[in-house]
Image: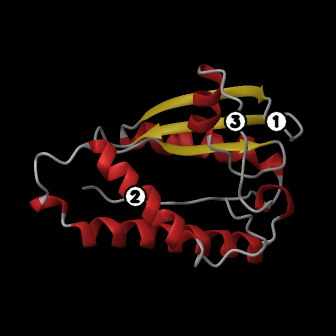
Amino acid sequence: MGITLNYTAELKSPKLLAELLKEVRALAKEAGWKVKRIKPETFKVPDMPPLHVEGVLLNIHPECEPVNLVFDNKGKMASYQWLELCRSFEADARIFDSDYWKTGEVEKLVERMNITNAAIGRVKSFFEGRGLESEKEEDSGDDLLDDLRKFWKRAAKDLPHKGRKDD
């Protein structure tokens, strides 16, 4: 299992992007890193204005994911790999993050993260309590899914979610 680094950035001014990219390319050349330049392009994401992006992806080590230094026209970092994947598969991608993408309201984002973490904790407890390593061979995947659905109906009621609609 590797180390995961989550990062984001926002330029003080979008006008600084050209200077940043020049310095990053020079650093990458000196370090021997592979660089993929992301030329200016536009992505259409539903329910949002077109997203104009530009930047670089740095491959700093063969066993690492690329370092994403791609920014939108407002100077905010954008996930190029995600945008490209959605375009490649013609996905009707939407961003669901408590409107943080649009509003920048940290409180809503933290609330959504707390809900997600609680849900992950509930599912983890289901599998830990089930003792899958000692499960009988005759149990099918359908049995597991049925049990998980039943468990989730009970566990989901306790999630810290305001305005939740019950199934």
- For label 2, count other residues whose C-alpha is less than 10 Å away and answer few (under 14), some (14-19) or many (20+): some
Q: Could you say where residue 76 lies in the image, as x and y percent from the top left?
A: 75, 52
Identify the residue under disc 3.
Answer: 93
Q: Residue at (74%, 45%) from the top-left corner? A: 17
Mark 3 or mark 2: name the one nearer the start of the chain.
3
Identify the residue under disc 2.
Answer: 148
Q: Which is more toward the observer, 120 or 84?
A: 120
Q: Which is more toward the observer, 87 or 63?
A: 87
**Marks 3/1: CA distance?**
7 Å
Q: Could you say where residue 113 lies in the image, as x and y percent from the top left?
A: 61, 70
Q: Quadrant of the N terminus?
A: bottom left
Q: Is residue 48 above or below residue 149?
A: above
Instruction: Determine the secondary structure under disc 1.
Output: loop
Q: Are marks 1 and 2 in contact (CB under 8 Å)?
A: no
The answer to whether residue 49 is left or right of residue 96 is right
Q: Mark 2 belongs to which amino acid?
A: Leu
When asked about the image quadrant of residue 164, the answer is bottom right
Q: Could you say where residue 34 lies in the image, as x and y percent from the top left?
A: 42, 32
